Image (cartoon, rainbow, N blue to C red):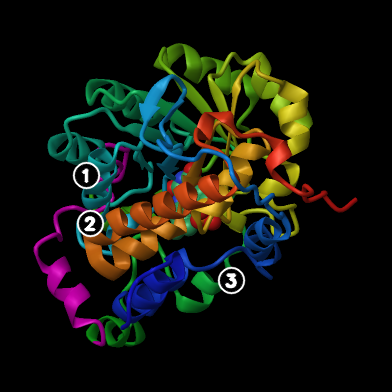
Amino acid sequence: MGAILEINDLKKLAERRVPKMFFDYANSGAWTESTYRANEEDFAKIKLRQRVLVDITDRSLASTMIGQEVTMPVALAPTGLTGMQHADGEMLAARAAEEFGVPFTLSTMSICSIEDIASVTKKPFWFQLYVMRDRDFVLNLIDRAKAAGCSALVLTLDLQILGQRHKDLRNGLSAPPKFTPKHIYQMATRPRWCLGMLGTSRRTFRNIVGHAKGVGDLSSLSAWTNEQFDPRLSWDDVAWIKERWGGKLILKGILDKEDALMALKTGADAIIVSNHGGRQLDGAPSSISVLPEIVEAVGDRLEVHLDGGIRSGQDVLKALCLGARGTYIGRPFLYGLGALGKEGVTLALEIIRKELDITLALCGKRNIQDVGPDLLYRTVAREA
Ligand code: FNR
């Protein structure tokens, strides 16, 4: 493996180190993957304005997301099964993010628990909530997140049912993973990954196992998960959760301006313009293409964040220019984790920081908080 200079280099290394079914789980979208691809491709269509002979010394990437200081406006997105990309994946990623000074968001569907993350970090992290049908379990998760000192709740709205994930189905991936001879072969060809996993068998879906009714062990988890996503989830539930949580609330999975206006009414602190990384509604537009109309609809009445398709610091800058206050990366940090563990997550963040800083400078700007649409040649229009 040559030098690691960009996120794609981490992706290639992760592919060599992570068993196929888990690498594919990260590196795929729903059905034909058209939305997954559009997320990345639409960023490339936006062109930046080069400026010269502007004083670009003393640049700053520091900003805030929901009032919290960040060294750059790039948080780690919540991702399920992160501990299958690398042993103790969530704990390693949380520590890397903490040291770097950006938020880490733990998924409900993580391998490590809320308490595991609290035990290895000093600063507050964010917790992502899926609203399951079992509302007692949801309340228990909210209480545990509060007890762990989480400083924001990220409530995911776009997974009332699971999208059609054909790669996972073809790979026979389930939660918990079943181990057929094919899977065992895939793992056996990744000895470094296997060695890492040896010491971590206790830490599996620890937000759920032992906490949800009827899920005392891993064997009962699969049936529980399949029936627990809630097709009746409503805006009233969002209001109920907001009240029970009482802290900073971020609504994730908004792609439509009507929904953005509904989100605004809830009094949430921020929304994340997101299509779940192209993993839910295949055929939906890219996140970046709908960002301008959503920003226009809500104005500055709440923070607008964006995820989906960010693979470089340039992409971060483009999202900020189009009105996002903050951004999130999912796969880029997962590739780093799968490739090199904690150092890989740090490297992913460093790569993005360097690209963001150099791009900012070459566009003639010194402060990340001072960018706008004037830095772009044209914005990507959503196709009608
Ligand atoms: C996700 N995402 C996600 N979102 C969420 O709210 N809860 C979750 O448990 C998961 N799980 C998950 C697993 C994997 C492997 C991926 C890749 C993504 C979606 C995630 O938070 C985010 O919206 C996307 O990852 C953003 O797109 P990029 O950065 O991966 O292109």
* Cβ of mark 1 under 8 A from ligand 1: no
Which numbered dot is residue 166? 3
* Cβ of mark 2 under 8 A from ligand 1: no
- Residue type highlighted by circle 3: His
- Residue type highlighted by circle 2: Lys
Range shown magenta? 189-216
Viewer-closest of 247 and 287: 287
Q: CA distance from mark 1 to mark 2?
A: 8 Å
Taking 56 as reference, is 165 left or right?
right
Viewer-closest of 31 and 362: 362
- Which residue corresponds to mark 1? 95
Taking 353 as reference, is 209 left or right?
left
Classed neighbour count for the residue bearing mark 1: other residues with Cα under 10 Å, few (<14), some (14–19), many (≥20): many
Marks 1 and 2 close (CB-CB < 8 Å): yes
Q: Residue at x 71, y 55 (%)?
A: 47
Q: Secondary structure at mark 3?
A: helix
Q: Identify the mark nearer the N-term, 1 or 3.
A: 1
For residue 199: magenta? yes
Q: CA distance from mark 1 to mark 3?
A: 33 Å
> Residue 231: x, y in percent?
62, 39
- Residue type highlighted by circle 1: Arg
> Residue 54: x, y in percent?
57, 40
Residue 158 visible? The answer is: no
Q: Identify the mark nearer the N-term, 3 or 2.
A: 3
Task: Give the vertical position of 113 relative to 310 (above or below).
Answer: above
Q: Residue at x 62, y 16 (%)?
A: 266
